[in-house]
Image: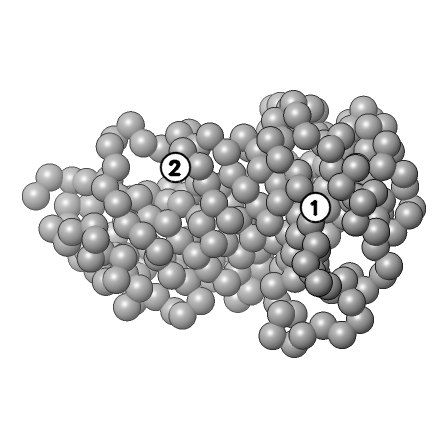
Amino acid sequence: MAERKIKLTIAYDGSGYHGWQRQKREIVTVQQVMEGAIGRVVNHPVELRGSGRTDTAVHAAGQVATFRSSTPIPSERLHHAINTRLPRDIRVRKATDVGDDFDAIGSSKSKLYRYTIFNYDKLPPVSAKYCYHYYHSCELEPMQEAAEYLVGKHDFASFASAGHGRESTVRTLKRCAVWKKFHWIYFDLEANGFLYHMVRNMVGTLLEVGRGYWQPRAVEEILAARDRSAAGPMAPAHGLSLQWVRY
């Protein structure tokens, strides 16, 4: 059978992994575990090309990756076969055949990350790995106002951690929505691309606005500074999830 390019949509609990990207060191990553499982299904080694990296303890509901194979297993059955070889904290949600011109990174139009906060003193234990327990008083409206200044095409250097390795720090943030349900605060950020730790640094900055340390318009000055030290602290990794990638 001719070689195919197969696209996978993947969900995972990142708590037990050192991020998505396979590493040279002997540490466990999502990509490494998945390549081993897929290889056992298709009976040859595979190399996944993901839509982007997620850091240690970051989760995903809609990571996308592709691999090449000449397996005769139909795509509608392939994700079930792979899931039988995966640990319970990683699941392939869907498998589809795509054309050779499809690229998991280059073909993407935007990505959406969601950051989750529990804003109350009594954190449900089952949620501890999936949210940031921020028990300080935090006002929603100032954060929503500050978030509006971030939307659009900007130089986001102030929100990029050292070692981002990108020639340009200009990105287009299509959405920065802050909303609340009971004690839960959610930050939905959609962009054409993200810099290293960009979402977590932006959330940490918006929380400083929410607790009254900065006024919402301070975000304009932070953007203009193009200096990481001008922004707020970085929010912890375990509150972050890659929700989907749009093509």
Give whichever of 17, 129 is nearer the camera. Answer: 129
Residue 236, located in which quarter of the rendered image?
bottom right
Image disc number at residue 199 = none
Furthest toward the left, the residue is: 1
Q: Nearer the viewer, mark 2 or mark 1?
A: 1
Q: Position of residue 122 (x, y in %)?
A: 76, 74
The residue under the point 67% across, 74% down is 124
**Element type where label 2 sits in the image:** loop
**Relative to residue 69, is residue 160 depicted above or below?**
above
Q: Position of residue 92 (x, y in %)?
A: 35, 57
Residue at mark 1: 178
**Relative to residue 130, is residue 20 depicted above or below?**
above
Label 2, label 1: how many angstroms apart (C-alpha)? 28 Å
Quarter of the C terminus within the rendering:
top left
Give whichever of 73, 215 is nearer the camera. Answer: 215
How many badges with numbers are in the image?
2
Residue 77, located in which quarter of the rendered image?
bottom left
The residue under the point 36% across, 33% down is 103
Q: Is residue 190 left or right of residue 1?
A: right
The residue under the point 46% across, 40% down is 245
Q: Is residue 169 left or right of residue 112?
A: right
Q: Is residue 159 left or right of residue 24?
A: right
Q: Earlier in the sequence, mark 2 or mark 1?
A: 2
* Amino acid type, mark 2: Ala
CA neighbours of label 1 inside 10 A, class few (<14), some (14 to 19), many (20+): many
The residue under the point 21% across, 53% down is 76
Q: Position of residue 156 (x, y in %)?
A: 70, 30
Q: Do labels 2 and 1 touch, CB within 8 Å?
A: no
* Amino acid type, mark 1: Val
**Element type where label 1 sits in the image:** strand
Residue at mark 2: 104
